[in-house]
Image: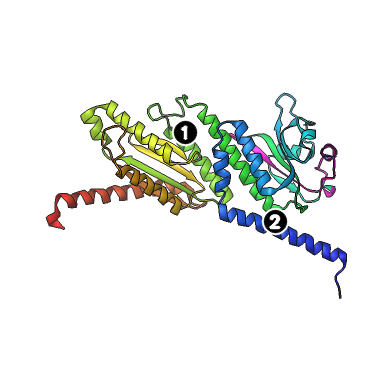
Amino acid sequence: MPLSDKSLNGEGQKMENDKEIRKLDEYVELSSFADIEIGIAAAKTINEVMEQVMHKIGEILSPLTHALLLRDEGSDQLYFKLVKGRNADKLKNFRLAAGGEGLSGWIMQYEKADFIEDVSKDSRFSGKIAKLIGCDVKSTLGSPLKVTDKTIGVFQLFDRQTGTPYQAADLGVMETIVDYAAMAVEKVYYLSAMKDMDNIDSVTNVYKRSSFDRQFAKEAERAKRYNQPLSLIIMNIDNLKDVNEKQGLEAGDRILKELAQILKTNFRRVDIVARYTGDKFAVLMPHTYKKNAELVRDRIEKHMQKGYRGTEIPFSVSIGLASAGPKDSLSLLEKAEKDLQKKKKAIQDKKKKKRNPEKQ
């Protein structure tokens, strides 16, 4: 018995939906969001961050129209700050009434992401937006933009180029992209406060321990929320105490500055570099599996072995590393410290063998 046109249409719609989900799964699996984080993390201003986020949303989720709405603190209204795609100029600076108008108003009020598969069946969609765009809107999706635990706006998508409605898989990807945006905005704020003594170490110009601890807690929670890996490197300057005693604190400071510069050069913008204690540095690497973290450690060790001595004062380092899944990310510090002690012991044992070859 032949299928009806209605059945064919329904089956075709399901196939398109499955195709979109597979496309998103493949993208996430192949890239591990690396391309997303590189583009967004490279932005140096908040405007650049938002432009990068809008670009990534368009590239990955293929909306016909997508926008960033920001909250006007004075009126409590939401206005369209950035708009891309279909009839974007008609939405620019348009304002939604205070009190939760449309899906974006709902998202702002409840501070949670959501999607509407069919807007004709959900009262949260505002018809005003469809009129401004100039055509029927069938499906929409939105996510709140939270910076330092405060919701300042909403990213919203209207329809998709393929014609398929938004699904739960799209929502997960959207939340991850926006989470990168929030992280990048927070980093811009931090970088603009480089002279703030509460956050930045005055000698090395990297984060202090207190600032690192705050960001570590956020990244551990983010790893748990999105089921992502997290890696940590702990690095100890082996002979800093001897340098300080024999050549003075100024010589020691030159070593600290040199090592900080080496770390900034070899890590990504999204990684968090800090002076953890007097002679110790910590580097937190979000969304990084152990094999990739080990490659970074190898690169640093080779860098040091080449005799890079911009300070003209010889120094060596021991590097501990730990990686964890979302459930045990809080134990990273303890694991990295144990690995560091293991590395230091191996170095000491090697030195002993060189001094006493007859005992081998």
Q: Identity of the amino acid at label 2?
A: Glu
Image position, residue 134 (x, y; %): 85, 40
What secondary structure is found at the residue carrying circle 1? helix
Image position, residue 113 (x, y; %): 69, 44
Q: Which residue is mark 2?
A: 20
Q: Which residue is mark 1?
A: 211
Position of the N terminus by quadrant: bottom right
The structure residue drawn at horizontal position 83% and vertical position 62%, both measured from the top left corner, is 9
Q: Which residues are magenta?
A: 120-148
The structure residue drawn at horizontal position 84% and vertical position 49%, both measured from the top left corner, is 121
What secondary structure is found at the residue carrying circle 2? helix
Q: CA distance from mark 1 to mark 2?
A: 40 Å
* Vertical placement of residue 104 versus 342, above or below: above
Left or right placement of residue 199 versus residue 280 in this view: right
The structure residue drawn at horizontal position 22% and vertical position 30%, both measured from the top left corner, is 245
Q: Quadrant of residue 239?
A: top left
Left or right placement of residue 263 versus residue 111 in this view: left
Position of the C terminus by quadrant: bottom left
